[in-house]
Amino acid sequence: MRSHLLNGTTAEHYRRSVTEGMERVAAKLATTERPFTGVSVDGLSPRIERIDLDRPLHDTTAALDELEEVYLRDAVYFHHPRYLAHLNCPVVIPALVGEAVLSAVNSSLDTWDQSAGGTLIERRLIDWTAERIGLGPHADGVFTSGGSQSNLQALLLAREEAKSEDPARLRILASEVSHFSIRKSAKLLGLGPDCVVPVPVGSDKRMRTVALAHELERCERDGLVPMAVVATAGTTDFGSIDPLPETAALCERFGAWLHVDAAYGCGLLASLKYRDRLTGIEHADSVTVDYHKSFFQPVSSSALLVRDADTLRHATYHAEYLNPRRMVQERIPNQVDKSLQTTRRFDALKLWMTLRVMGADGIGALFDEVCDLAVEGWRLLAADPRFDVVVEPTLSTLVFRYVPAAVTDPAEIDRANLYARKALFASGAAVVAGTKVAGRHHLKFTLLNPETTAGDIAAVLDLIAGHAEQYLGESLDRVS
């Protein structure tokens, strides 16, 4: 079995095996005509369940043949221009080169003596991102597994900086359409169910600063501590960006930590056209960025940035076998000193390779393309009597609802939209997301693929309308 260990004597075996795997994927990408095959849970489960994991195949080619059947054939392919569902982006090739390198070398970014150059590369990318945000000379941060972890750590720091002896008095104020990880983080931090205060949004789905001011005043009046205000720069459902300058001013007035969840909107940091939409983010105490959403990076690639590096001490613990205190005096950089994770992949290498090959302007141009596409899609929806579109896009998300002229029952329209989404997914012709707006089912396009065209959007809208009309026709037949 030693022949499977990667080392100097097996380098050629490594080259052949990985090349064969990459060739399989490349062939699949070149021939995939739909984003999904439409396979059902019941159709795929038996194939995987019948595999005896205690009987290895002892052959890479045979294992890849099997993988074709249980995974590659039925994977959901985000690179396809008619994948329009969630915040999953197609990935750029330089990042995949980085992924191949980091997986093979297998550095762990917790301590200097496990990563050396990897530590310095990650730190340089943190500095680069902080500079793009405008956080100032004392900023720092660390790569994380994703936006949820970044948000959790940001709120941990905010809780500790609030210095309240009574956790029951702590409050987190966030828009009513903020990411669910805000509430989840509050629970994980041991805060009560009333800790997160939802702030109303306007018709543009941006947090209303008048309402935020009212809630902050109420906290002050009731003896509560606003430990953090979370402003979202790119809500998951609408791509809306909260009014950052006004929110920052309120945080300064009331002494609240300002966290900006820019997991989605961070692509604007590289934008050539729309960077001003993030104006005000430079006032944040902490910022979440997900490079694997709008920097076209493979999962996972996220980071938490903070204005004051000293606040990261709240995540610091020292172990004699790993990062003893003496290393701080010796100026040995251990990333575990500021991370919630210990063992951690060198995910920063993917972004490093992307910047070194494409440059920030290259990334920004791609993100600008999808933002421009969303405007085209909004115009199509606004002009199409079959659909109601909720809000003009700020980033690259469109939320809409099929509304037939002949049906007035909102519940029946809900069912038609749900049916259309499921039928479309089952057909494999396209993949779209869904959500609720004011209690009613809506559909959602999250446009992150520059290869998607207005023609693709129009074609998918026709498919949705066709499925919805089929459902309503059958429904009327059942009633009659």
Image (tube, grey):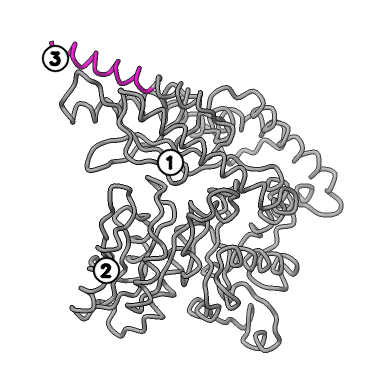
Disc 1, SS:
strand
Comes first in the chain, label 2 or label 3: 2
Identify the magenta region: 464-480
- Residue reaching furthest to the left: 480
The kind of residue on which mark 1 rests is Thr
Front residue of 227 and 8? 227
Q: On the image, numbered disc 3 is attached to which residue?
A: 479
Q: Which residue is mark 1?
A: 397
Q: CA distance from mark 2 to mark 3?
A: 51 Å
Is 115 located above or below residue 457 in the figure? Answer: below
Look at 66% across and 60% down and name the residue there: 346
Label 2 belongs to which residue?
Answer: 213
Q: Is 309 one of the magenta-colored residues?
A: no
Q: Position of residue 57 (x, y in %)?
A: 67, 35
Q: Amino acid at mark 3?
A: Val
Judge by depth and name the residue closer to the eye, 139 or 470: 139
First reached walking from the N terminus: tag 1 or tag 3 = 1
The amino acid type of the residue labelled 2 equals Ala
Which residue: 47% across, 24% down?
Answer: 428
- Tell me if 469 is positioned left or right of 303 in this view: left
Instruction: Provide the secondary structure element on which disc 2 rests.
Output: helix
Residue mark closest to the camera, 2 vs 1: 2
Q: Which mark is residue 245?
A: none
